[in-house]
Image: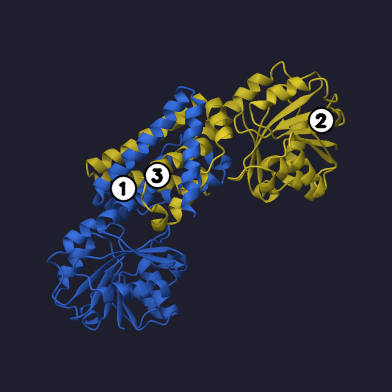
Chain colours: A yellow, B blue
Amino acid sequence: MNTVIVGLGVIGGSFAMGLKRIGRGPVSAIDTNRDTLQKALDQGLIAAGDGDGSALLKAADLVILCIYPHSVPGFLNAHRDDFKPGCLLTDVTGVKSALAEELKGLLPTGVDFVLGHPMAGREKMGFDFASDAVFRGANYLLCPLLQTKEEHLRLVEELALELGFRRVRRISPQLHDELIAHTSQLPHAMAVALINSDRKGRETGQFIGDSYRDLTRIAKINASLWSELFLSNKEALLAAMEDFSAQFSLLKEAIRREDKDALRALFESSTTRREKLDE
Amino acid sequence: MNTVIVGLGVIGGSFAMGLKRIGRGPVSAIDTNRDTLQKALDQGLIAAGDGDGSALLKAADLVILCIYPHSVPGFLNAHRDDFKPGCLLTDVTGVKSALAEELKGLLPTGVDFVLGHPMAGREKMGFDFASDAVFRGANYLLCPLLQTKEEHLRLVEELALELGFRRVRRISPQLHDELIAHTSQLPHAMAVALINSDRKGRETGQFIGDSYRDLTRIAKINASLWSELFLSNKEALLAAMEDFSAQFSLLKEAIRREDKDALRALFESSTTRREKLDE
């Protein structure tokens, strides 16, 4: 299976490493950064690299798009005549409904697309921080579209499990985006707001425990990518943020009223729900 | 140095383990639970255990109070004639201003008190989950009062470092409580609100990444202890919560307006501030 990775950033690079590890070659890559391509060639991760890549795409059975969400439609448009009939495209972006909508009419006949979301990443960006170790034990979500072929869904599933992902689930783009709003985007928003709400001039770092460190790790964030992800999931994210704010207000009100029973009840609820999460 | 630990819960038990490991004996313990005392005796962690403990206190050079914050004044009152002149008391509770206030007039002459806060803990409670491994690398805060003797502050500092704490800092009870509101209580409130804001019936656990798991771990919370801690730090905690809400609203507003530049600026600020935290 001839695979082309588009975009050798932290995720694209991790895919290149993982595909090499499991012996799924040959892999080539398209990236606008020549140095990155050279590094990947030197490390034996790719067999060929190119800045434009039309020639590489013409021979590709599988194309893994590891570029920014807003670049996907443009890339498809620019290369619509380059895809081999029967080839499969898949992406890794974190929001799905908007892309599912944009794909309509963009796919050449005979080209299939599996919307995919490997729920693994790092706080750092760029090829130098790529590591397929982040895949191990993580979840991989697929959002089948009406026209997506079952054999192609199975192919990505198989690949994901071989790469070390623990579980591959299929859900609708809408449910995906609602869940991601709650489980990923909202936590990032919380971490950003937490660290931004620290009073300046305090040596906070000298006085923190693990929980603060854990909670704020994701406040180190790729500003370009995440502002894009937030805005492309506007409605679901705002709803999740409002739900959170309502619960946060319940805590504030209980403290303001010095209502110990109300506080205890909220803590007991969160304890039970968190325990259920680990089941 | 004859040490008595009052309360063999998860923290008291961890102190017993740590003191044994570093060879600072003999250690005895006061606990209302006979089974717990027996376990600690069986494990060779304590030389003696008692439910009331007046006799043990009379021989104690150092008393480590590992009981709930609200129980500290009552304990001091009940045992005011039991403390040996020159003995040192220290506590481990997470809020300091209220206790500093309550201590006035409660300490018998010749008895000193070092307000201490080992910033280490576990999500589980009780002796069975005690482990002095949680001390390793953690911060220990001391809040000297006007009458606290320098030699006693040094003694607790020394002990903390021997037990594996990385850093012991001295700060005022007021600053302690402000910092703790931001770095510990607020994160707990956020985690509780996050998990309580999940829509019921969704199989959220099937779709989460590490960040959600990390962020919500502390939503498994000792409801009795934390409702007490929250209320005893009411003003500082509400202020920290309001600061957070203001920052969270900035994010919400930027998303609502689809203001990508504003979002980017907030993310860039959090990234810079989080990087500074690790320095």
Q: Chain of mark 2?
A: A
The image quarter containing residue B128 is bottom left
Dot 1: element = helix
Residue A8 on image: x %, y % = 72, 39
Hey, which quadrant is residue A112 in on the image? top right
Q: Residue at x 66, y 48 (%)?
A: A129
The local secondary structure at tag 3 comes to helix
- Mark 3 is surrounded, within 10 Å at the Cα level, by few (under 14), some (14 to 19) or many (20 or more) other residues, namely many
Q: Secondary structure at mark 2?
A: loop
Q: Disc 1 is attached to a residue of which chain?
A: A
Q: Where residue A174 appears, x then y in whole percent?
A: 57, 26
Residue B43 seen in render:
no
| Quadrant where the N terminus of chain A is found in the figure | top right
Q: Is residue B160 above or below residue A235?
A: below
Q: What residue is pinned by disc 2? A: A53
Q: CA distance from mark 3 to mark 2?
A: 48 Å
Q: Is residue A21 left or right of residue B235?
A: right
- Mark 3–mark 1 Cα distance, whole angstroms, equals 11 Å
